[in-house]
Image: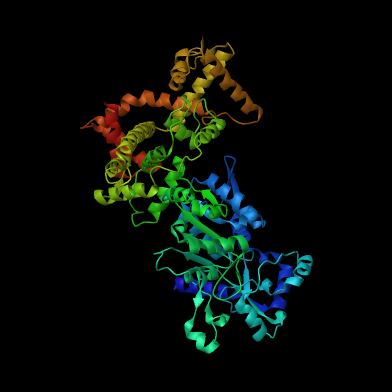
Amino acid sequence: MDILKRLSHYREEEEKLYWEGTFAEYLELLKERPWIAQSAHSRVYNMIKDAGVGEVNGKKKYEFFSKQLFGLEEALEKLVEEYFHPAARRLDVRKRVLLLMGPVSGGKSTLVTMLKRGLEAYSRTDKGAVYAIKGCPMHEDPLHLIPGHLRQDFYEEYGIRVEGNLSPLNLMRLEQEYGGKIEDVMIERVFFSEDRRVGIGTFSPSDPKSQDIADLTGSIDFSTIAEYGSESDPRAYRFDGELNKANRGLMEFQEMLKCDEKFLWHLLSLTQEGNFKAGRFALISADELIVAHTNETEYRSFISNKKNEALHSRIIVMPVPYNLKVSQEEKIYEKMINESDVADVHIAPHTLKVAAMFTILTRLKEPKRGDIDLLKKMRLYDGESVEGFNSADVEELKKEYPEEGMSGIDPRYVINRISSTIIRKEVQSINALDVLRSLKEGLDQHPSITTELKEKYLNYISLARKEYDELAKKEVQKAFVYSYEESAKTLMDNYLDNVEAYCNKAKLRDPLTGEEINPDEKLMRSIEEQIGISENAKKAFREEILIRISAYARKGKRFDYNSHDRLREAIQKKLFADLKDVVKITTSTKTPDEIQLKKINEVVARLIDEHGYNSTSANELLRYVGSLLNR
């Protein structure tokens, strides 16, 4: 019954939103809310902006796209700021077909679908409300009713520009139904809907020999010729092409570059002049955003053809590359898995991360700089701190290959291999090794992977495996540390006491005997060596730590375990190193004694409770790390 109540509530809300009145009443509405007269491009831009704009690493983050598109912040910022924003301000860029160009499964279709669904929802809000001449199959802008000679006066009074002319059908209706009285013409609020063909259209090319231009522009209804007597009577015309129905909103042109030329010229006329030719009528005005998408190969072929030169200047190309951040690639896989029927299968921690590492490595170009390798580049792109490098280095790396991200493994391939792993194992748990194995096996079945590429990709799988080995060891070693944070804090406090005494040339007091003792150089070096601090660099490092402590104290803050990234890493590594033998013995013993068994059970419990494993994946992890430590 709950869903029925919601359906009833939805219907009531729809009825509340509906508005109908004369053109005179619409003008009164316009005085109160002038934004309802916005153009299609302006509506799309405001829809994106109204959803919220944040900032991530100096790049704008549009909340509108944030739940579906990951790692495309730069491409989306360029799209919004270089196309939607100026188009919304009526600059010349709105007179271009928007062409999204990028590799397969890169997010182009998702982006367009989001714009469509977004417009449907936005037209039901106060800011996105759309009003049209009632009964018009093209949901025509009511302001087209204003005669050309009065439009300047209208602009001076309302501050709204009127573009476009009344369609042939509404021109006839104005004379015959309303006796020329513009103020009496009925206006209604409309709601965009792709299913109902209101304000949103989709055109997909088929066989050029059989596809009719009527799919775009509508056609004559021959059954009405006898009634109306002429093909030039607008009542004898079906205004049901995609360009007609998408008026005031958005039309998606799928695989545009595969289309016959005669279809493209209609698009270009519409974007450049704001009108198109249909039947035996004057030019028909339409206000809509045309967005197409294609892959790079087809685009290169298109621009190399001299016949298409006239089209080039009327198309604005926006690259939509693959995501190049490991953490964002993980989110893509999570989204795709959650949308499937295998969302209940347990995927062990780091599984998707390791798969994402492999995928990102296939998309990155080898750095030209000798001081950085592909793994460091991958970490820098993902926002990780890498010693000796900063954000300026990241920007420099990106400039080396402007086309980076236009090739490599696509997300669908990885999801297909994860799905294959789940189905083949027929268990409710998979781990990183299962997926890496499946990715490796799948390379033989991938039609576009050459022998040379395969060798390169196998190397990337090995790199991802090594990264996983380190993650796995850290995970188990961390779980072996009882009250890990407490142990780390104790070790750090001990280190800081010694550093302070060392820098101040002071002595420490033994907590047991009370006698004065020298700072414990052996302890300090055992920690510093974990992160490669040399004998010559130890003094500078210790002084840096002391300066940081003082800076925190001046601000009234407490210096803790997480206050210095490198020191935290050193403390962790030191704890892990001290525990290595314990871990090795406990995980690799085939017949553990009672104490070892108790320890294993504690570790498994901690992996389940604190790290997101289940019983199967935790035990598999322990066995694997045991084998690694025994090598």
Q: Is residue 426 visible?
A: no
353 displayed left or right of 417: right
Q: Position of residue 487 (x, y in %)?
A: 44, 28
Where does residue 388 sit, x and y in percent of width and height? 52, 25
Q: How many marks?
A: 0
Report the quarter where the N terminus lies.
bottom left
Question: Foreground: 486 or 6?
Answer: 6
Q: Name above or below for residue 474 compared with residue 58.
A: above
Above/below status of 305 relative to 176: above
Side of 560 where 354 appears, left or right = left
* Residue 200 locus on image (x, y percent): 52, 66
Res 21 quadrant in image: bottom right
**Looking at the image, which is closer to me, 296 or 6?**
296
Q: How is the image coloured?
A: rainbow
Q: Residue furthest left?
A: 591
Q: Where 386 sits versus 414, above or below? A: above
